[in-house]
Amino acid sequence: MGVVVSEVMLQQTPVSRVEPRWREWMERWPTPAALAAATTADVLRAWDRLGYPRRALRLRTCAEAVVDRHGGRVPETEAELLALPGIGTYTAAAVVAFAFGGRSVVVDTNVRRVLARTVVGTALPPPTPRAAELALAARLVPDDPTAAAAWAAASMELGATVCTARAPRCPACPVADLCRWRLAGSPRTSTLPDAGGRPGRGPTVRSGAG
DNA sequence: TTCCGGGTCC
DNA sequence: GGACCCGGAA
């Protein structure tokens, strides 16, 4: 449950601010059953100023669902996690990887940016994730579950600490020498010939299979 | 002071 | 596609 709580908190807040709140939260409500029994006032107070207080309430609703549907134990499959309130595609994948060591495709905004730069060669990913982008992310995940979890953690951390949206620290980047965006001169606008933006609309690009 | 990022739900 | 909230960057 700790991973569920931390991932929901981290959905909108940097680690440094989440950490103390998370510790207090888990100390107070160590299990889904304990959280499910918490009062609204206590939950909101413990959430403090993390933002989106509705998510704190949804987290309690999630705990209730875990108690009702899964006997008080957080489910281990992505589909079951997705069905819980407050858990979307990112959090479900993150819980599978970081709580249970399973293989999943963890794609948050950091991962999207890292892949856009290193692989595609554009400064930023498209505004909304496309099927091709998710397919790319999926095919880069190692087969081995442990390696997959490490991949998820590494790609997210790279995006959070080095490959940042503004002022990326390319000299400190471990993959700078293979980063397509950097090799292209770190262009601010994305006008790659094939990999990236098509100006107009056209048939959906499904090529690349094979 | 304004603006923007960030994942989920509707 | 927008609302939700807040901190930090612009």
Image: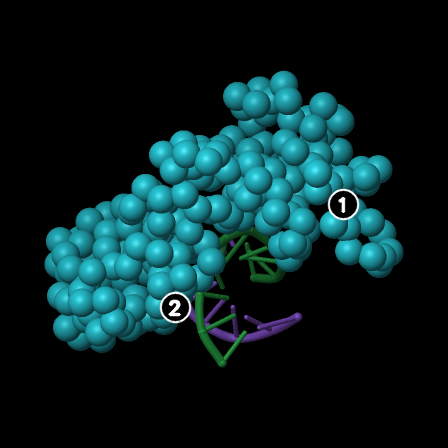
Chain colours: A cyan, B green, C purple
**Residue A113 place in picture, x, y as percent:** 59, 42
Subunit that carries the residue with mark 1? A
Q: Is A22 left, or right, of A12 in this rendering?
A: left
Q: Judge whether A205 appears above or below A31 on screen.
A: above
Question: Is there a contact, CB below 8 Å, between mark 2 and mark 1?
Answer: no
Instruction: Please name the residue shown 67% across and 49% down the image.
Output: A132
**Callout 1, which amino acid?**
Ser
Observer able to see residue A191: yes
Local secondary structure at mark 1: loop
Task: Locate the C terminus of chain A and report the quarter of the image it occupies.
Answer: top right
Instruction: Please name the residue shown 30% across and 55% down the image.
Output: A76
Local secondary structure at mark 2: loop
Say which label, 2 or 1, has the lower sequence index. 2
Q: Residues within 10 Å of mark 2 (few under 14, many from 20)?
A: some
- Between A78 and A84, the residue placed more toward the observer is A78
Subunit that carries the residue with mark 2? A
**Callout 2, which amino acid?**
Ala
**Residue A70 place in picture, x, y as percent:** 23, 67
Label 1 sits on residue: A207
Label 2 sits on residue: A83
Instruction: Please name the residue shown 75% across and 33% down the image.
Output: A187
